[in-house]
Amino acid sequence: MAKIERRFMAHYLDTAQPGSPAQYERLGKDLEEYSPELSATVEKTKNILGETRVLLTGYEKNGKVEPYYAEKGDPLFARLQDILDSGKVLDDCATTVVEVHLWEEKEPSKGFPATKERAILEVTSYGGSAAGYQIPFAVHYEGAPVKGWFDPDSGKFTEK
């Protein structure tokens, strides 16, 4: 079997304000790495027979986007700058993330297999070096991903 190139695992972030129609932008332009981290909730118990029982009850997932260089006219920059300028919190920082399997076969009129999940954007700092204005941020996934298809050309997610 051939290894899958990293570019075929795509992450699209909805840059629209909450309540507006979704406007997905692919993460990765200035990123050398984006790896959502999984933090499992694991319970281990040992009985009197010396046996260990392991119970995995869930995951918390988050990813860091760093660096993120701001570009005039970029909808993601506008969304992040608005969070900063307005001191937004709670649902005003909500968005959705679609993770797309571009290595799989594209379904005509549907797109590629994908999962969509609600997430919260956390701006972690802003400023940066002389290389350019940076707004690194974290994406905190809320769980309960929905399976479906995503068409990168139209930016539409269709639930299974």
Image (cartoon, helix red, strand yellow):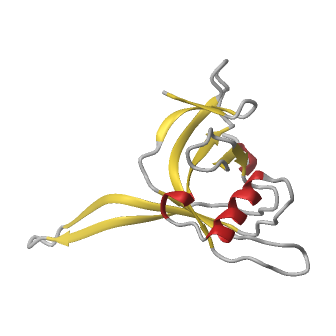
At 48% across and 63% down in the image, what residue appears? 90
Identify which residue, 9 or 145, lies in the foreground: 145
Position in image of residue 64 (x %, y %):
63, 67
Q: Is residue 85 above or below residue 92?
A: below
Query: Outermost residue toward the front?
Result: 86
Examine the rendering and report whether any part of residue 4 can be seen: no
Query: Outermost residue toward the bottom?
Result: 129
Identify which residue, 56 or 77, lies in the foreground: 77
At 49% across and 57% down in the image, what residue appears? 91
At 72% across and 65% down in the image, what residue appears? 81
Horizontal side of 87 relative to 68 (left or right) equals left
Position in image of residue 14 (x %, y %):
64, 47
Query: Outermost residue toward the top?
Result: 108
- Identify the image quadrant of the N terminus: top right
Horizontal side of 147 relative to 35 (left or right) equals left
Q: Is residue 86 above or below residue 116?
A: below
Identify which residue, 74 or 56, lies in the foreground: 74
Examine the rendering and report whether any part of residue 116 can be seen: yes
Quadrant of residue 134 in the image? bottom right
Position in image of residue 160 (x %, y %):
48, 27
Horizontal side of 70 relative to 50 (left or right) equals right
